[in-house]
């Protein structure tokens, strides 16, 4: 039995290992999935500057359909405005595939604080109104 293997382009993605906090050590992961033949070559940049030497490249892992997965890890400390890219090269790609990841830290929501403040104001207004009617009621007796 003879198998003819066709080159398959990698499906690439970039994401952080943990939730992003400015100034806190983290890891970016560039994942190449479902490609054939192995391996892929992965390069990293931070704000346009090559930082590949700080990264690691895993072995390639087989899938049941005779394709492969491979990961590259880049340790980093997020700073506001930083832009990272991972560029994947593979035989099945006509041009390198570049994925971009930007430091985007969610600001805390003001919703709970506003809700708490409105609740406190309504409660104080209720106490003041109750006190007013209590005093007025005592004056009538």
Image: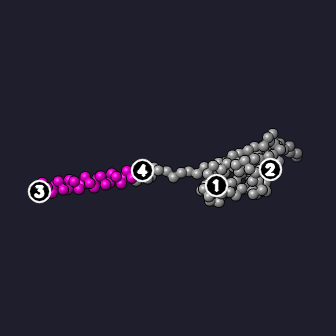
**Residue at 45% in and 49% down:** 111
Which label lies toward us, 2 or 1? 1
Residue that carries the numbered disc 3 in the rendered image = 141
In three-dimensional space, the C-alpha distance between marks 1 and 4, rounded to whole angstroms, equals 30 Å
The reply to whether residue 31 is visible in this rendering is no
Do the numbered discs 2 and 3 sit on residues whose CB atoms are within 8 Å? no
Q: Position of residue 47 (x, y in %)?
A: 70, 49
Q: Nearer the viewer, residue 57 or 76?
A: 76
Residue that carries the numbered disc 4 in the rendered image = 114
| Category of crowding for the residue at label 4, using alpha-carbon neighbours closer than 10 angstroms: few (below 14), some (14–19), many (at least 20) | few
Examine the structure image and report whether residue 119 is included in the region drawn in magenta: yes
**Which mark, residue 78?**
1
Q: Nearer the viewer, residue 77 or 134?
A: 77
**Which mark, residue 41?**
2
The reply to whether residue 123 is visible in this rendering is yes
Q: Earlier in the sequence, mark 2 or mark 4?
A: 2
In three-dimensional space, the C-alpha distance between marks 3 and 4, rounded to whole angstroms, equals 41 Å
In three-dimensional space, the C-alpha distance between marks 2 and 3, rounded to whole angstroms, equals 90 Å
Q: Quadrant of residue 59?
A: bottom right
Q: Earlier in the sequence, mark 3 or mark 4?
A: 4
Q: Position of residue 53 (x, y in %)?
A: 77, 56
Which SS type dominates the magenta stretch?
helix
Q: Secondary structure at mark 2?
A: strand
Find the magenta span and give its range.
117-141
Which residue extends farthest bottom? Answer: 25
């Amino acid at each position: 039995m003879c198998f003819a293997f066709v080159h398959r382009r990698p499906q690439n993605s970039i994401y952080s290992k943990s939730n992003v906090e400015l100034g806190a050590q983290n890891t970016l992961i560039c994942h190449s999935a479902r490609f054939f033949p192995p391996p892929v070559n992965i390069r990293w940049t931070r704000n346009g500057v090559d930082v590949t030497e700080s990264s690691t490249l895993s072995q390639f892992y087989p899938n049941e359909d005779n394709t492969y997965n491979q990961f590259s890890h880049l340790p980093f400390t997020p700073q506001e405005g930083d832009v990272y890219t991972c560029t994947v090269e593979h035989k099945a790609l006509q041009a390198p595939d570049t994925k971009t990841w930007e430091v985007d830290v969610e600001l805390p929501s003001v919703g709970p604080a506003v809700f708490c403040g409105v609740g406190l104001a309504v409660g104080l207004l209720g106490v003041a109104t109750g006190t007013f009617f209590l005093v007025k009621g005592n004056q009538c007796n």
